[in-house]
Image (cartoon, helix red, strand yellow):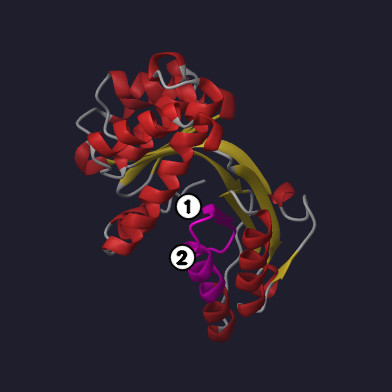
Amino acid sequence: MSGHSKFANIKHKKEKNDAAKGKIFTIIGREIAVAVKEGGPDPANNSKLRDVIAKAKANNMPNDTIDRGIKKAAGDANSVNYEHITYEGYGPNGIAIIVETLTDNKNRTAANVRSAFTKGNGSIGTPGCVSYNFDEKGQIIIDKEECEMDADDLMMMALDAGAEDFSEEEDSFEILTAPDDFSTVREALEKEGIPMAEAEVKMIPRTYVTLDDENAIKSLQKTLDLLDEDDDVQNVFHNWDE
């Protein structure tokens, strides 16, 4: 796993402009709505909602915005009609791409995702065509500069809480968990006041592909940018070694 925590990318994403911040708030707002609908508005009894709230705080979403989102979803549960749909496909040179969406209009989302692939000289595939090359894992990234705990102590705490793997990068620590153990491990770290730069269940590539061709890189970037701009798109995972 070493070298692929992509911590620099996380920092870069967070420092993007207000439009990007608006996009992440839209994404988290939908996740709050779905979590409330599925498990109720009380975070104490809804681990999925606790995880989304932690993600919201990591992205500097104001507390009153989080509270408003929970109240709105709780009072308006019947109107929350988002559906999870995952698309899989290929970018240039066979780069594997997984797109997770949360949508209230399947036709719109399918057309937009297909268009993003086409404009970047890629193609949508059938379900399962690339996901076999990824592992679903809970991933927690910790910024070394913000963490006062010794690496060995942090590793033991994470493993004791149920983590599968711990690795140290140049500027960060990465903790991996099974999807079912993610909430437990994240909450154990939160309880000890460990600051998390990112904490989510993700699709992590088993192998990475490098691109040397400038045109291929531009095409892939075009697809990723178009997906990034789409409010229906929650997550994009790929095996391009940037």
Residue positioned most to the bottom: 215
User: In the image, which disc is placed on residue 173?
Assistant: none
Q: Which of these two is toward me, 153 or 32?
A: 32
Residue under the image location 46 percent in, 65 percent down = 229
Helix, strand or loop at disc 2? helix
Picture coordinates of residue 105, whole percent (x, y):
62, 54
Residue under the image location 38 percent in, 30 percent down = 70
Q: Earlier in the sequence, mark 1 or mark 2?
A: 1
Residue under the image location 33 percent in, 44 percent down = 172
Picture coordinates of residue 226, whole percent (x, y):
52, 70
State the extent of the magenta-drawn residues as a range: 221-242
Q: Name above or below for residue 194 compared with residue 57.
A: above
Whether residue 151 is visible here, answered yes or no, is: yes
> How far is disc 1 from disc 2 in space, using C-alphas?
24 Å
**Left of 194 or right of it: where is 98?**
right
Q: Name above or below for residue 200 compared with residue 114.
A: above
Picture coordinates of residue 236, whole percent (x, y):
55, 55
Whether residue 157 is visible here, answered yes or no, is: no
**Left of 66 or right of it: where is 108?**
right
Q: Are marks 1 and 2 in contact (CB under 8 Å)?
A: no
Picture coordinates of residue 4, whole percent (x, y):
47, 52
Residue marked by disc 2: 229
Q: Name above or below for residue 154 compared with residue 196.
A: above
Helix, strand or loop at disc 1? loop
**Left of 41 or right of it: where is 178?**
right
Tell us which disc is closer to us: 1 or 2.
Answer: 2
What's under tag 1, amino acid-wise? His
Q: Which of these two is toward me, 170 or 46?
A: 46
Residue marked by disc 1: 4
Q: Residues within 10 Å of mark 2 (few under 14, many from 20)?
A: few
What's under tag 2, amino acid-wise? Glu
